[in-house]
Image (tube, grey):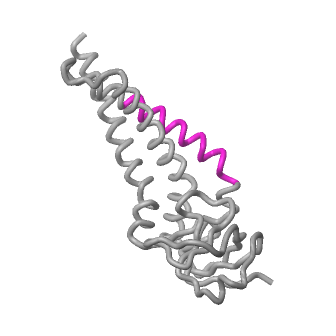
Amino acid sequence: MKLHLQEKNLLVRRIGQIFLIVSSLASVPFFSWIFGAKFLPSTGWVQDHWHIATAVGIGFSGVGLFLTDRGLRLRDIDDMPGPIGCAFIFIAMFVLNFWLGRDLVLLGVPLFYAMAAGEQTELLYVVERAEGFSDRKCRRKIELKNMPFFFDRLCDLPKEFRDTLSLGQTIIVTGHGSPAGVFPSSARISN
């Protein structure tokens, strides 16, 4: 009986280690954005893989909730958070893991593909908003339509260029990348 329990704990530990490695890979696009390496997945990639990404996000959340449950069960009963604390932990883990799993497909795969096999690429995007506020991380921003949160904008483009853009207009973004995504270096209006 004790040997069976040890094997079960070893399996849970291995699942946790694999989950941690995959979570680390899934967070690379977000951290690249934080540290200034702007990346845009292609609109085609996002549209074609949205349902797959959602399924991976749900699966990722399921594994994350299983591991969270196992982790909470290993604690002393005196150390356990109350029912509200447990509910908060499970909701937070579901949202975080869904986001990581979804973004692994929508952002991670194209980003790694662009880094490994990228070349000079041009991709089409549709403008959602060209005027408005800027923030510390993205000055003189152009927001793009149907793109994932945080990865839906072009930054630091000249005001003269932004002033010529309107809602729904198509632009061509050039940079190092692949058909799945690009690290933008310039943009121009599509004819």
In the image, residue 110 lies at what x, y percent?
A: 56, 62
Left/right placement of residue 79 relative to residue 102 reads: left
Work out which quarter of the rendered image holds the N terminus and state it. top left
Left/right placement of residue 117 relative to residue 143 reads: left
Depicted 60 relative to depicted 25: above or below:
above
In the image, residue 72 lies at what x, y percent?
A: 29, 26
Q: Residue at x 24, y 21 (%)?
A: 6
Quarter holding residue 169 = bottom right
Depicted 189 relative to depicted 144: above or below:
below
In the image, residue 51 lies at what x, y percent?
A: 66, 45
Figure label count = 0
In the depicted view, which residue is nearer to us: 167 or 175?
Answer: 167
In the depicted view, which residue is nearer to us: 31 or 169?
Answer: 169
The magenta stretch is 48-67
Main SS, magenta region, reads helix
In the image, residue 186 lies at what x, y percent?
A: 59, 84
Depicted 54 relative to depicted 45: above or below:
above
